Image: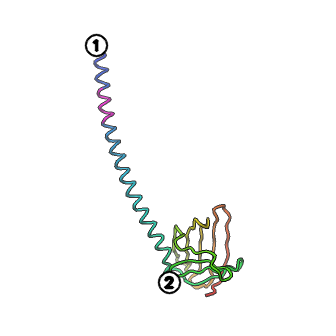
Amino acid sequence: MKKTALILLMALMALSYVSAQNLGDAADAVKDTKEMSDEVAADTVEMGDAVNAAAEEIKAGTFPLGEWLDPNYDAVWAFQNQNTMLYQNDELVYNFKGMISDFKVGGDVSGMIEVKFRCDDTGRSYTFSMKKDSTDMTMYFMKDNGLDYTVVMEKVK
């Protein structure tokens, strides 16, 4: 009986030692994960800053600058070098400066140029696209509630 108890005690001690080693490894893994998480958070902040900077600097040649009329609402979308704004009846309805995220400018081999961005304040994701040789622009947006809107707009300035 003493021999069995001694064997069980040694087995428990060995198990405790292994568990302590695993806990140490687990603690190191948690520490490493925390450090990686902090690095990812820092990178995310830098990426967010880069997205906002890009959104505020739509460069001529990348996406056309100017004003386009949404005929359904008699509203003018103004793409400027530092901002995007929406006017109706010559009055500013919305200024997007500093309000957009997920900003992307792109194009394809067919000559289609596209700007996409998200505005949480308006609850919409916007896409503006146009053929390189055209002055007409198509606007598409999706509201958070799932409703969407598409219109072809003529350039007015």
Direction front: furthest residue: 91
Q: Which mark is residue 60?
A: 2
In the rendered view of the protein, which quadrant contains the N terminus? top left
Q: In this view, does 119 lie to the left or right of 3?
A: right
Give the amino acid type for the residue marked by disc 2 in the picture. Answer: Ala
Q: Is residue 82 left or right of residue 4?
A: right
The residue that appears at 37% across and 58% down in the rendered structure is 39
Give percent across and percent down for residue 143: 64, 65
Q: Which mark is residue 2?
A: 1
Magenta stretch?
Answer: 13-20
Precedes in sequence: disc 2 or disc 1:
1
Give percent across and percent down for residue 156: 64, 86
Direction bottom: furthest residue: 157
Queried whether the magenta region covers residue 29, the answer comes back as no
Give percent across and percent down for residue 152: 66, 78
Give the amino acid type for the residue marked by disc 1 in the picture. Answer: Lys
Q: Around disc 2, counting alpha carbons within 10 Å, would you say few (fewer than 14), some (14 to 19), or many (20 or more)?
A: few
